Amino acid sequence: MTDLSVTTDAQTQELTDGFHLVIDALKLNGIDTIFGLPGIPITDLTRMAQAAGMRVISFRHEQNASNAAAIAGFMTQKPGICLTVSAPGFLNGLTALANATTNCFPMILISGSSEREIVDLQQGDYEEMDQLAIAKPLCKAAFRVLHATDIGVGVARAIRAAVSGRPGGVYLDLPAKLFAQSIDAETGRKSLIKVVDPAPRQIPAQDAVQRALELLKHAKRPLILLGKGAAYAQADADIRSLVEKTGIPYLPMSMAKGLLPDTHAQSAAAARSFVLPGADVVMLVGARLNWLLSHGKGKTWGGKDQKAWGAQKFIQIDISPQEMDSNVRIDAPLVGDIGSCVSALLAGIGSDWAKPPAEWLDAIAERKNKNLANMAATLAKNPTPMNYHSALNVVRDIIKANPDAILVNEGANALDFTRSIVDMYKPRKRLDVGTWGVMGIGMGFSVAAAVVSGQPVIAIEGDSAFGFSGMEVETICRYNLPVCVVIFNNNGVYRGTDINPTGGPDVAPTVFVKGARYDKLMDAFGGVGVHATTPAELRKAMEQAVSSRKPTLINAVIDETAGTESGRITSLNPQSARKK
Ligand SMILES: Cc1ncc(C[n+]2csc(CCOP(=O)(O)OP(=O)(O)O)c2C)c(N)n1
Ligand SMILES: [Mg+2]
């Protein structure tokens, strides 16, 4: 606790204030890092937090600070903190707060706000905005603190809301006046709350466990689907045991890659389009049946048309009871925290669990081996110019040699090819665009990943994707973070080949400056910039980046014709019936 003292004639009274109580409340709860961007009314808060021993990581744009807080929350199960100024700073942080909520990442966006009396009468204050009202529909919970004595409760409520149950984003509104409010230090100290058991376990009901086990036991073609909820849970050993003891093939969703090594014999990732329609019982572990899984129906799942359900039965493990039946019937809902659910299943399977029929496993292995062989042949090619495959063959080797490195990934083709080509070996090492497929997470995630883990970070970025947060390469250099950004530069969004059909001087909307040298951006801030046109150059530069831990940006030139519209999700583009 930091105290301020004032001497009056009568006595010396120890005082504290809003600034110090916010810092003390966060520290009391084990929060040691703030991602943010200073300005009125929170500049002094950032200084004082640093003076109080917190790590304060200052960004160039709040969206990136907010994305950093979100992914720090995912990696640590502690709410990541983003601190911004009022109205515009708050709004800049809001997209990532909403994205965090959608992805179930625990974070707290703390924004300073203007004077309530003026805001509420709409009298035109400096950066006037009713931030609480705007944040509410976009996050899991939103709170405002008006009195210094309520800071302890406000921070405690924000922490609980962020991490308990299904995690998500929380907004905490701190008006400017609050920071300077002085109160008696002892009163302040007593008002703080160290949150006990912020994310209580939620034990599944025994009958629900039995129902799930019954279904699984009688399955002829079972499949386990691991989502990023399973990765978040940090129940890695139990999840691996469950998969291995049951012998059931599994598919990892993007951010669940590495929960078991992608090279695991039971991974069915290379036979996805065979196992989804073919399975008779599917157990979802922290994965939702949203668009990323074609809503659990349609042709992907063996349905006869886009809306039709397949023949499979579903077991779903999720902390939120409302998730059940969201898209198709869930035959065995298993509601609880993933760690508790998985350990209850493990206890129930005993030691004489029969492995799935060989017919199913052999059929998967056959598809898988064929697809892996095709992939290996494609990766071995060395075309000029370099394409996604030949470049990713290098990235794949670098991650294999450095399994503790964290892979951040965004783009369209740059995302989809990386996800399918680059194997992950450890949990929570792949961080990407998540549920929304949002661009702009790249540098915020990279900074946070490096700060939180101390491990090298490799960011594979489409050239468009990078542009959303590119200025943070200065942040990476300023904090000297071991981040290697690789830009897959194909001169545009999806491809660099579109032309303006009118023949006018403007280039097509998807096309950027040709042959741009993103590596020079890194030079500007003292990092290492490399221009790579061949896999050999890319390999050398990546190896050096990882071993030197120097901030590095590699401009990897990719064939501008190689990508497809929207990567793998071309079919989501609406089509005009009119002839062009
Ligand atoms: C915030 C946001 N804006 C726009 C989009 C649409 N979008 C999807 S991928 C993408 C960029 C794809 O280009 P690039 O990153 O260069 O990857 P490439 O396919 O060229 O490898 C865009 C703009 C989005 N997903 N999110
Ligand atoms: Mg591109």
Image (cartoon, helix red, strand yellow):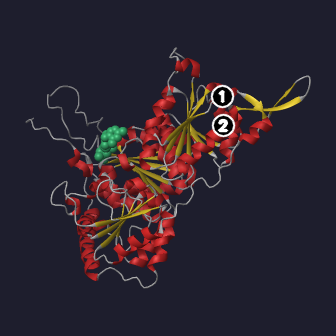
Amino acid, disc 2:
Ile
The image quarter in which residue 143 lies = top right
Q: Is residue 120 above or below residue 512?
A: above
Ligand 1 found in image quarter? top left
Q: Residue furthest front?
A: 207
Amino acid, disc 1:
Leu
Residue at 23 percent across and 62 percent down: it is 301
Q: Nearer the viewer, residue 195 or 6?
A: 195
Name the spot of residue 326 as percent of width and height, x first: 33, 53
Comes first in the chain, label 2 or label 1 = 2
Q: Nearer the viewer, residue 213 or 73?
A: 213
Judge from the rendering whether residue 104 lies leftward or rightward of residue 15; answer left or right: left
Question: Which residue in the structure is indicated by mark 2?
Answer: 151
SS class, disc 2:
helix
Residue at 46 percent across and 84 percent down: it is 351
Residue at 53 percent across and 36 percent down: it is 59
Judge from the rendering whether residue 361 lies leftward or rightward of residue 117; answer left or right: left
Question: Which residue in the structure is indicated by mark 1?
Answer: 178
Q: Quadrant of the C terminus?
A: top left
The image quarter in which residue 420 lies = bottom left
